[in-house]
Image (cartoon, rainbow, N blue to C red):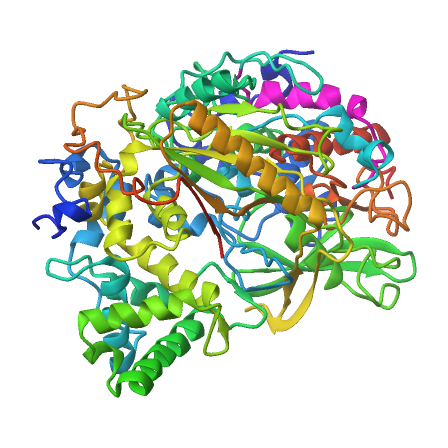
Amino acid sequence: MAPVKDRNASAWLLPPVPGTNHAMRTDMAQFRDEDEVDIVIVGCGAGGSTLLQRLARAGWKAVALDAGPFWDPERDWVSDEAGSHHLYWTEPRVISGDDPVPLGSNNSGRGVGGSMVHYAGYTPRFHPSDFHTYSTDGVGADWPLEYGDLKSYYEDIEGELPVAGEHWPWGDPHSYPHSPHPVSGNGELFLRGALACGITAKVGPVAITNGRFGNRPHCIYRGFCLQGCKVNAKASPLITHIPDALHHGAEVRADSMVTRIEIDDRTGKATGVHYVRHGRSRFQRARIVAVAGYSIETPRLLLNSASQRFPEGLCNDFDQVGRYLMVQGAPQTAGRFESEVRMWKAPPPEVSSEDFYETDPSKPYKRGFSIQTVSPLPITWAEHVAAQGHWGAKLREYMSDYVHWACLGALCEFLPQPDNRVTLASEKDRNSMPVAHFHYSQCDNDRQLMQAAQGAMEKILKGAGAEEVITIRRFAHLVGGARMAADEQHGVVDADCRSFAVPNLYITDGSVLPTQGSANPALTIMAVAARAANRLIAGGPSKAT
Amino acid sequence: MTALPLDPKDGGGRFPGFDAQGQSPHWDPVTQGVVLARLGRPTDLRFFTVAEEATARALFDQLLGQRHEPRVPVVNMVDARLAEDQTDGWHYEDMEPDPAAWRNTLAELDAEARERLKRPFAELSWEEQTLLLTDIQAAETWRGRQTSRVWSLWTRYACTAFYSHPLAWDEIGFAGPAYPRGYKNLGLNAREPFEVADARPTQDPAAHTAKSQTGRQR
């Protein structure tokens, strides 16, 4: 593998102090709407940014549109919880089902960098078993590719972020480019409790620099990873892929909300995208269109791009668009210790265990969960306490005890189900575009996993000496909604992220994942996009058309 | 401003002399601007009507146990969010978007008080308000809505406002923003020079409750 700097120089293109290289943005390429660019990418998060960087390096004329702002971390982000509301996608949406999933906070992103701007920073790989859960366990789905097809991309991305952690014994065992970070009181208790229970726990894997990386400084352990890293230590595409993309001639056009993909009914091919920028409706011509708007907005855009050829929505001939949308069950269990833990100090992502990741034949449920440290800041912690029913004086008393609590979070592999889906609501947004309606219900397996994960976390915390434990049941992460499959009757795109229905339309984000494992999805989304980019590059900019 | 009044039995005074605001010279200027603005004059009300204001004030005082001045100006902070439509965007299919849900649930709360006690919610005694809210919280549904959704709407906005305030941080030992300073002393019982040890570490609010509790995000 070539040194990182030779394949992605982003970290060396940033200034040697926290902040942004403003000149790169002002000098950035600017394509005209009427130029037929080689590719227009919709969305500048994990998938879109990775694709953009790869294609720009290969000499493609590439432009990425993002509905949100082009963040300037020094100006736009604060070291404060309530002041970070603007990092989320808070456009109107409707939720329903037996277990409606609140959106607009931890599971949504906005602006260049996407959700990785405010994700904790955990970047585990999927396990080899994740790619064929249907064949092995009779649940979920088989991917049209295997772990081995993604392995080299995982390694590439881990180098580019870069990822810090101990040697990883689970799934396909591997090492990380940066050594593990020191842990705080929260991580210390997880390690102690796991040891007491005979559970393996390891430090990492987190995409936070441990030592200088290019011009990116060492982490300062300030604990505000979920509010956007002002330090430039935690990886997001804004600093890991966008700088290199701009350096190689790409354009990032922020504040541009794509409302419809245009299809030429005669050729059946995409010709570009309609978007609204600064109040004006515009159209960017492109030879290839790639959608990377994530699991809610990608299906919404496809469904809103109906045409004569696609009356039920683009790529929706087989009623697959929007379906099999997944969330992970993410219960958080906190334990009370007489020692002061002060869990908000240091990054929330510290220590993980994947001991419960795989199907355990002795259990009544299939698949599993992972356990990680989470370290809620005061507002999120108040939500955890309030979820127990406490309010008034009792709430204040619990909160005054904040220094004594440690908190773990689980990620449960909830299964993909056809009726968990995005459709269009009758309600419209300010661009007169119908908003997404997300319907979600758990299945029995999901509920059993949630319960088992809570039990495991309680055991670990008590093993570490916790006097009491309190749990909040919640969700995290989104994937699926436009999944990849072996054929068009079971999914929207193929293994290369190319849509079955339109030969020059790609989807390169988390919505293509057919299953989710118990892993945080960012690394896999980037790896899948990097692989799609490689396939596109191999074909050349003109081949796909 | 002095400390918020909080009875020691409710956790008041556990961090004697601790002053989160005193750390503000160590914060970056943008963060200073955002956080210190919360200490300035509260914004004038723009969203709540006069009747809604009365109900909302009483509700927030109850939810956050704010019985005396000085208070965190929660009603002004929530009003500003709703006026600016600074919501999470989503709403349940069978419930209104947050601004309308606030107006309607405050009206329902007031109606409930009038039906039961013949007075507006804001005119009830502290104990009467507490009892009424306790009843509402205990029921599965309330006036045609799932109680958990209403309760979550109320507590989410209340807690977000209250625990964004430096005076609230003082009573929980949290020093607030940590950039560009960061932390040097990680680990159990490790403190920074500006942090203050809990004076009553055995005051465990969970000591007399069940050893394991579960709630749910809404």
Determine which quarter of the picture holds residue A399.
top left
Q: What residue is at 28 percent from the left and 25 percent from the top?
A: A339
Count of numbered badges drawn on the protein: 0
Quarter of the figure with residue B158: bottom left
Q: Residue at x 26, y 84 (%)?
A: B117
Task: Point out the stretch of residues depicted in magenta.
Answer: A140-165
Image spot of residue B46 (x, y percent): 28, 73
| Residue B56 locus on image (x, y percent) | 28, 71
Q: Is A20 positioned to the left or the right of A45 in the image? A: left
In the rendered image of this protein, does residue B142 appear above or below residue A213? below
- Asked if residue A319 lies in the magenta stretch, the reply is no
Front-lying residue, B96 or A158: B96
**Residue closest to the eye, A281 or A431:** A431
The reply to whether residue A367 is in sight is yes
Above or below: residue A122 compared with residue B35: above
Q: Residue at x 80, y 24 (%)?
A: A149
User: Which residue does the image show at 10% across and 60% down from the upper left?
Assistant: B69
Q: Is residue A215 visible?
A: no
Q: Position of residue A377 (x, y in %)?
A: 35, 40
